[in-house]
Amino acid sequence: MKNNIRRWIPAAVVPAVIAAAAVAVPAVANAAPNLPEKLPQQLLELVSDSAGTPFSGTIEQTSALGLPDVSSLAPTPGGDSATSVLESITGSHTANVFVGGPTTQRLQVLDGFAERDLIRNGDSVWLYDSDKKEATHLTGSPDLPAAPAITPAEAAAKLLAAVEPSTDIEVVDTARVAGRAAYELRLTPDDADTLVGSVVLSVDAETGLPLAVTVTAKGQSDPAFSVRFSEIDLAAPDASLFEYTPAGDVTVEEETLAGHTPDAAATATPEPTVVGDGWDAVVVLPAGTPLDDPMIDQLTTEVDGGRVLGTSLVSVLLADDGRVLVGAVTPQHLEAVAAQ
């Protein structure tokens, strides 16, 4: 996959953060609304029924994983450096998102005075970088690249998929998020290997759409990672938002994503695998994942079998055999998985 597409898919850490943790700052300063009491199962059903709800809004994503803020550092060419990956999971990021349905979405990631757009309309996807004045047009396959920012609904779906019978689920409060009344549903894992202390989902009282998700690491009181709506409109976005025509000064690259034919499968890069399930699941990226960067040695610690990057919520093991293991688990758990 081309480098300009990889900018939308950070090489290792971000997929695991999304798979194991995503969050939103707890309540806003407004008074908590009075809402009818609901059981946890009722809220879970409300969230499930909200799938496919059209909306548009602004998302604020904040990370406090105990990593340095590298947003001021220039990444190495190609966009796959450790700096690029860390920039995606440190500091704060803002994105405008528009969802018209399962195959119509637009995401605008704001980077200072520049922006990156991902526009999907059916089986056509445009990736646009205003800073580089470059656009990539993807066609020919439903397998589309993921974006570096996720909505609270996507985060909630992935987190709820990790829920195990031992997870304690309770309705803890009400709140206002982006001006809407919401229930707060807390998930508390009972798993010795996970770094996740608790997760709070802020669920829209009317539609069940998750408006905010907050993950707190074990032993901490402040959120480690958060994603929330600061503004939201539940009206269906205008269809014109999902159309894109590049300006004359934009360099366009056309790329066809062919299906997984036998020849393509034989030469394709091996897909990541997941070891385990629930809160201690580990994403294993195959050898050859591009993470070469001088910062790797500065940010990691040498262990038996590789180098470890440890944060309050996510651990990364760069194995000596070239694999990259990531999860919201202890470094020791990653080392045990790597040795299997």
Image (cartoon, helix red, strand yellow):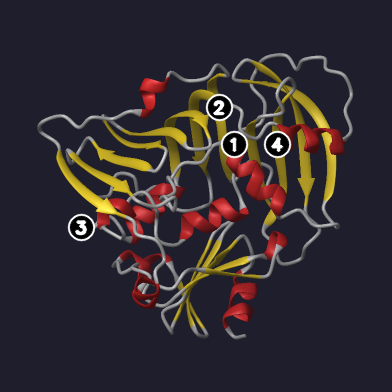
**What's the CA distance linking mark 1 and mark 2?**
8 Å
At label 2, counting other C-alpha atoms closer than 10 Å, the crowd grade (few under 14, some 14-19, many 20 or more) is: many
At mark 4, the secondary structure is strand
State the quadrant of the C terminus. Answer: bottom right
At label 1, counting other C-alpha atoms closer than 10 Å, the crowd grade (few under 14, some 14-19, many 20 or more) is: many
The residue that disc 1 covers is 152
Q: Is residue 134 left or right of residue 233?
A: left
CB of mark 4 within 8 Å of CB of mark 1? yes
Q: Amino acid at mark 1?
A: Pro
The residue that disc 3 covers is 77
Q: Which mark is residue 229?
A: 2
Quadrant in the picture for residue 337: bottom right
Measured as percent of width and height from the top left, residue 195 is found at: 67, 59
CB of mark 2 within 8 Å of CB of mark 4? no
Mark sitting earlier along the chain (1/2) = 1
Q: Which mark is residue 201?
A: 4
Residue shown at 59% from the left, 19% from the top: 178
Mark sitting earlier along the chain (1/3) = 3
Q: Amino acid at mark 4?
A: Leu
Mark sitting earlier along the chain (3/4) = 3
* Of residues 75 and 280, the one drawn nearer to the viewer in this rendering: 280
Residue 219 is at least partly visible in this image? no
* Of residues 40 and 70, the one drawn nearer to the viewer in this rendering: 40
State the quadrant of the N terminus. Answer: bottom left
Mark sitting earlier along the chain (2/3) = 3
Q: Which mark is residue 174?
A: none
Mark sitting earlier along the chain (2/4) = 4
